[in-house]
Image: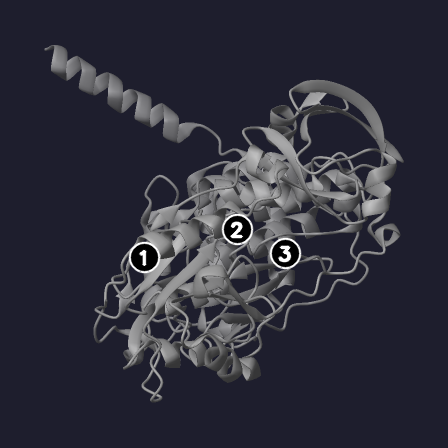
Amino acid sequence: MKKTLLLLLLLTALTNCKQQPLTQVEKLATTAKIWGFLKYYHPEVGKGTYNWDKQLFKVLPKIEKVTTKEELSQVYLDWIASLGKVESCSSCYEKSSSNYFGKNFDLSWTQDELLFTKELSRQLQFIENNRFQGNHHYVSHHNLIGNIEIRNEPDYKDFDWKDKKLRMLALFKYWNIIEYFFPYKYQTDDDWDLVLQQFIPKFLSPATEQEYHLTMLELVVKINDTHAGLVTPLTNDYFGIKRIPSKFKIIANKAILTRFYNDSLAKKDDLQIGDVITKVNGKPIAEILEEKKPYINASNASVRLRNYSHAIFNGSTDSVHIDFDRNGKSYHKFIKRYTFNEFNYKKPSPKKWKILDDHIGYVNMGVLEKKDVPAMMDSLFTTKAIIFDLRNYPRSTMHSIAEYLNKVPKEFVMITIPDLRYPGKFVWTTPHSCGKNNGKEYTGKVVLLVNEQTQSQAEFTTMCLQTAINATVIGSQTSGADGNISTIEFVGGFKTVMTGIGIFYPSGKETQRIGIVTDIEITPTIEGIRKGKDEVLDKAIQFINTTKSSID
């Protein structure tokens, strides 16, 4: 009896739930999905037969008027019918799914009975099964690489941020590009469907133009990709373009000064390397980190701390108040802020390679060029170890170097690329190898230094050089953003990017967000910074001098 009563109550609750009028967010979220699905799947839309932006503007007023699932589904059915007949597609059926990467694809929402009528779901399923197979009007593959290029999108040069329908268009376009072509959608912290629902109100009602720009930035940050970012004059105004003349590193919710852009300007305010800043304008560093977090793009926590470089001390005024610790004592004072041009900063010109004490080679991968590799290897060939410093951005030297490290080519990476014949799916490509026998095999230890500055090509290079039989990775978590980028343009010309291909070890292990996993982990300390030490390099030297080679 009790079970029967509970079942009746549940059925009554579900019935009442279904009878509730649809909310604005629910209607717009499903419209965003339907519009994006038809854009990339419907044959006539894929050919470019329709101005797809104008099609959205036509349907939005109809969407606003409906109140029930049945009415909403009928609007979509009428819209689909107006696009023309979808012919059966014999080439659309998969011959084999073994080459597909399985984690990113999900069109199950098209069959959700709580969202759509059965008739609409059948129509969507039919379009999926008979999707467009030609050269798509709105998206193509980048030559050779495989990441996407967005094309044939209107410019909207006279974009007015107050135009609600254009803001909705901006959200719908970006959300669907990530939905179908971002290889790591499955890794985002927040479910991408929920992100759409969360951001519809934000795009509907920004109070100011700056708030709208920050909303776009916040949306980009939601994909958890260090490659992704968005800079506009108004986001710059939010953070402020004036800065102190020092680089810094966040350690334990404190900002430690590490290097100066201009020594004389730093000296004027008595700034010293190793000063530990605890508050800025009266706010603890931890509070500032939390306040600015929604606007800091990052694949992981380590690189997010790096990317706070413009968010801690920047501002619009000529000075900023700091509380800081030095040599065990606490102080506070105002210090000057400057535009970057006022620093007259000149990048250091470090040596490309050198021999350290104990007959250890050292290579700065950020300045070494491909043409330098033979001379570098000749110079360091008899050393007992070579340290390749990848805490920078290399210059496409990995294959040239690997020829000296591996007797035979070794697989180091597997890649996924978007399948434009089945949007949302990604396919595995043939594994890539590096190294070959060029007659000169280096037999000493190979040590690779990494940290949060090791990003993209630096991570890719590390993966290649890791294949050396004597390789050891020392340092801390890398950026976790590897793979060629694709440019995305918001309505109005605001540009961002995303990682466009999936990068994996041959085992299938991800590098995105995780980064390169170190063999020996070490991070700089406040004391080490204060004393001017490179603790990661010191650890590498210690490792070389105290550990036997695996081929000794």
Residue at the limit of the structure toward the left, as seen here: 1
Name the residue carrying label 3: 58
As helix, strand or loop, the secondary structure at mark 2 comes to helix
Identify the mark nearer the N-term, 2 or 3: 2
Q: CA distance from mark 2 to mark 3?
A: 14 Å
Question: Which of the marked residues, 1 or 3, is nearer the chain's N terminus?
Answer: 3
Left or right of 259 on screen, residue 263: right
The residue nearer to you, when weighing 310 against 55, is 310
Residue 44: x and y, percent?
Answer: 49, 73
User: Badge 1 local density, few (<14 within 10 Å), some, or many (20+)?
Assistant: some
Identify the residue shown where x is 48% and y is 30%.
21
- Tell me the residue that label 2 is attached to: 32
Q: Is residue 9 above or below residue 266?
A: above
Image quadrant in which you'd find residue 485: bottom right
The answer to whether residue 91 is above or below residue 233 is: below
Quarter of the N terminus within the rendering: top left
Mark 1 or 2: the one toward you:
2
Location of the C terminus (image quadrant) = bottom left
Q: Mark 2: which amino acid?
A: Ala
Question: Residue at 59% across / 70% down in the picture?
Answer: 352
Report the amino acid beneath label 3.
Answer: Lys
Report x, y in % for residue 510: 34, 56
Disc number for residue 122: 1
- Nearer the observer, 363 or 53: 363
Q: Amino acid at mark 1?
A: Arg
